[in-house]
């Protein structure tokens, strides 16, 4: 024990001398037991004897509380009580010369509590699962032995110590032959005492359900059968957008495949109760439906009207399985429709396009129109209109002004002519 090194050095030195230098006549001192392991605070009986042929002087050197309980011609029995730590008591005898021998005393403390065993209560066969066993209050913890067993099979734990505690860990993989409820035990031994604890572990086998499609890839309008089956005792639920029968160990549904069923995921869930726990295993399958090209309003809008210079995205994509090839060419010059980002929109993309989607399962066409609204140079137009209006207005004003002058001039001339005629006309006799 580590604490034994803290005892006074003199008894150990005397014991060594006694062992190396036997007394005269070959007399020897013996001790029994040579090593004793006792719980902390416990007691032990130590027998000191000699081979001397006449009555010798026998004794026991120790700092522990001792009591002589029996004796004979060449032996004495001592009882050591209240032992709290490691010690090396020394038996000595005098037979013409003094000889001595020491014993080793492995003080320990093992609490009355049981180890703490942590483990899953249910374990799937073939999978790795952890086991932990801990115990506190040990002295000395480093001397404790730990054994982890599953129905008698040693799990070979790794043991670590920390002051007065220990931790035993193991990772095991249960096999199919161990399926059922098994007993997992942890036994901690220190000195001549042991503490143990057991837990039940249920080992089960639960493969994923078997989910099948009558055909994983079909043409549209084909009847498809979906079936899911699990092991006996399990309940199966099948889903995939189509109602199935009530849960049971086997479920089945049928559907008439359409284009909308392409890529549909069927989901099967199997439930199994093990030791009060509900376990789940899932399986999925995808259905592929072959159908010809689709190019309708939701795939390609058909009529776009945008402002020139705006930021737009032109989307036009045909559906189908297999995916059809799509080409859109403008009537007149066969220019390709610029599908994707239009940054910015230009008036050159305007026009009527004929889109054709083609695959091994057929082809469809669709006419689409791109309108681009653009502004002419309104400033120049405004200036020209303003100038024209100004010129027109000025001309009109000049016209009316000249016309008015002519009218006034004409009226003035007529008035002058009338006045002249009046002056030249002879007066009428009375």
Image (tube, grey):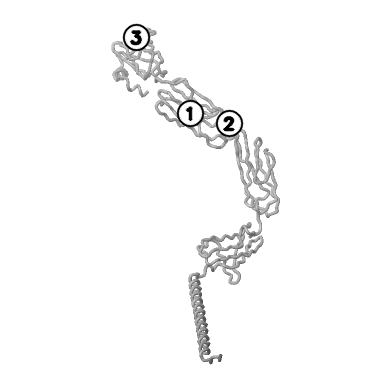
**Outermost residue, front side:** 430
Residue 99, given in percent of the width and then of the height, sits at 31, 14
Q: How far is mark 3 from mark 1, CA to CA? A: 56 Å
**Relative to 239, is 10 on the left or the right?**
left
Gap in angstroms between the C-alphas marked 2 and 3? 68 Å
List the residue tagged with mark 1.
133
- Cα–Cα span, label 2 and label 1: 18 Å
Quadrant that contains the N terminus: top left
Residue 368 at least partly seen = yes
Circle 1 SS class: strand
Is 22 placed left or right of 233 in the picture? Answer: left
Q: Picture coordinates of residue 83 (x, y %)?
A: 38, 16
Q: Earlier along the polypeptide chain: callout 2 or callout 3? A: 3
* Of 78 and 379, the residue lying toward us: 379
Residue 283 sits in quarter: top right
Q: Which residue is mark 3?
A: 53
In depth, the one of 286 and 29 nearer the eye is: 286
Q: Which residue is mark 2?
A: 202
Label 3 neighbour load within 10 Å: few <14, some 14-19, many 20+: few
Q: Secondary structure at mark 3?
A: loop
Q: Please, is residue 7 above or below residue 345 in the view?
A: above
Question: From this viewpoint, is residue 75 visible?
Answer: no
Numbered-mark total: 3
Which of labels 2 and 3 is toward the front? 2
């Amino acid at each position: 024990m580590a604490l034994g090194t803290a005892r006074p050095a003199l008894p150990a030195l005397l014991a060594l001398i006694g062992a190396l230098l036997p007394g005269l006549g070959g007399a020897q001192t013996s001790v029994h037991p040579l090593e004793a392991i006792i719980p902390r605070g416990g007691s032990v009986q130590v027998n000191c004897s000699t081979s001397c042929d006449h009555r010798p002087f026998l004794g026991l050197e120790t700092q522990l509380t001792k009591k002589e309980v029996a004796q004979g011609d060449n032996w004495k029995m001592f009882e050591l009580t209240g032992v709290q730590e490691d010690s090396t008591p020394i038996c000595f005898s005098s037979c013409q010369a003094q000889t001595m021998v020491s014993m080793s005393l492995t003080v320990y403390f093992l609490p009355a509590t049981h180890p703490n065993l942590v483990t899953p209560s249910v374990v799937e066969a073939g999978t790795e699962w952890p086991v932990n066993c801990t115990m506190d209050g040990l002295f000395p913890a480093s001397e404790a032995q730990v054994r982890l067993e599953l129905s008698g099979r040693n799990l070979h734990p790794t043991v670590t110590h920390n002051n007065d505690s220990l931790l035993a860990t193991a990772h095991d993989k249960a096999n199919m032959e161990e399926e059922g409820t098994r007993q997992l035990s942890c036994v901690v031994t220190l000195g001549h005492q042991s503490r143990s604890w057991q837990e039940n572990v249920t080992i089960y086998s639960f493969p994923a359900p078997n989910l099948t499609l009558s055909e994983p890839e079909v043409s549209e309008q084909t009847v498809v059968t979906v079936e899911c089956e699990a092991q006996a005792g399990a309940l199966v639920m099948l889903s995939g957008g189509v109602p199935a029968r009530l849960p049971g160990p086997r479920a089945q549904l049928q559907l008439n495949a359409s284009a909308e069923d392409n890529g549909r995921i069927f989901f099967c869930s199997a439930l199994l109760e093990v030791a009060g726990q509900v376990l789940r295993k899932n399986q999925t399958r995808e259905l592929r439906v072959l159908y010809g090209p689709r190019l309708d309003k939701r795939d390609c809008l058909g009529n776009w009207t945008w402002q020139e210079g705006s930021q737009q995205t032109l989307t036009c994509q045909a559906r189908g399985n297999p995916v059809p090839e799509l080409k859109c060419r403008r009537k007149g010059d066969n220019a390709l429709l610029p599908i994707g980002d239009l940054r910015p929109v230009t008036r050159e993309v305007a026009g009527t396009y004929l889109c054709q989607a083609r695959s091994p399962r057929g082809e469809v066409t669709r006419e689409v129109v791109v309108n681009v609204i653009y502004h002419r140079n309104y400033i120049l137009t405004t200036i020209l209109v303003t100038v024209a209006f100004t010129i027109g207005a000025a001309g009109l004003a000049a016209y009316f002004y000249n016309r008015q002058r002519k009218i006034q001039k004409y009226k003035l001339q007529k008035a002058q002519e009338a006045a002249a005629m009046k002056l030249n006309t002879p007066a009428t006799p009375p």
